[in-house]
């Protein structure tokens, strides 16, 4: 195991310990079982607000070529072809999340580290806000978040639901092994 993957796994263990300590459960459900925010006006930040994005990420433009593995999480903007996203690299990781989801926010820093850690392996990371992509969420049957899907050569091969960074890394490693 390389040093970078060992460090990522170690931080994943920390996330699991934190999740257990806080009794986070599996994730947030889109069915409305989540507690309402104390300030309903703060539920959906207005476009352009400095604190609106959940993760520091770059927009994924709907162009002939999406950027490949660059160590950053790219935000999938509304109107972007999802087929182009999943075919943008040999192995693609797509995080379906929402700004109001606590476990999604907890998973975010681990995904950032993974994106940096796996860039040399050619893995691309994308973030999809379920509130902006409701049709895609219905099409892919995503019942709860965080839901992280792994694609190999444009086809879905695995997924992880909840804040489970170690499981996610193991599944990314398996996809990379199958890609060779």
Image (tube, rainbow, N blue to C red):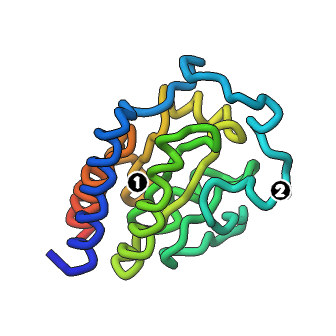
Q: Residue at x 49, y 53 (%)?
A: 94
| Rendering coords of residue 77 (x, y %) | 72, 54
Q: Earlier in the sequence, mark 1 or mark 2?
A: 2
Q: Residue at x 71, y 67 (%)?
A: 63
79 or 59: nearer the eye? 59
Q: How many marks?
A: 2
Q: Is the residue 47 above or below the residue 50 in the image? A: above
Element under disc 1: strand
| Rendering coords of residue 155 (x, y %) | 41, 50
Q: Residue at x 53, y 49 (%)?
A: 105
* Quadrant (top left/top right/bottom left/bottom right) for the N terminus: bottom left
Element under disc 2: loop
Give the labeled residue for mark 2: 49
Q: Which mark, residue 151?
A: 1
In the displayed structure image, the side of residue 42 where residue 128 appears, left or right: left
71 or 45: nearer the eye? 45
73 or 55: nearer the eye? 55
| Rendering coords of residue 65 (x, y %) | 63, 72
| Rendering coords of residue 145 (x, y %) | 49, 36
173 or 51: nearer the eye? 51
Mark 1 vs mark 2: give the one in front: 2
Picture quadrant of residue 43: top right
In the displayed structure image, the side of residue 118 where residue 52 appears, left or right: right
Residue furthest toward the left?
Answer: 1
Picture quadrant of residue 61: bottom right
In the displayed structure image, the side of residue 29 where residue 80 appears, left or right: right
| Mark pair 1, 2: CA separation | 32 Å
């Amino acid at each position: 195991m390389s040093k970078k993957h060992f460090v990522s796994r170690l931080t994943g263990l920390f996330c699991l310990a934190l999740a257990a300590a806080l009794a986070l459960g599996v994730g947030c459900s889109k069915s409305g079982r989540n507690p309402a925010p104390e300030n309903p006006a703060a539920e959906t930040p207005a476009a352009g607000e400095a604190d609106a994005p959940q993760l520091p990420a770059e927009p994924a433009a709907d162009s002939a070529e999406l950027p490949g593995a660059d160590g950053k999480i790219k935000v999938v903007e509304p109107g972007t072809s999802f087929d182009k996203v999943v075919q943008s690299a040999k192995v693609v990781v797509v995080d379906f999340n929402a700004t109001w989801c606590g476990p999604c926010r907890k998973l975010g820093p681990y995904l950032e580290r993974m994106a940096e850690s796996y860039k040399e392996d050619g893995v691309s990371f994308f973030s999809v806000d379920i509130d902006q992509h409701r049709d895609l969420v219905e099409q892919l049957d995503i019942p709860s978040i965080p839901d992280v899907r792994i694609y190999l050569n444009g086809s879905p091969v695995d997924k992880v639901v909840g804040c489970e960074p170690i499981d996610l890394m193991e599944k990314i490693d398996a996809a990379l092994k199958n890609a060779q």
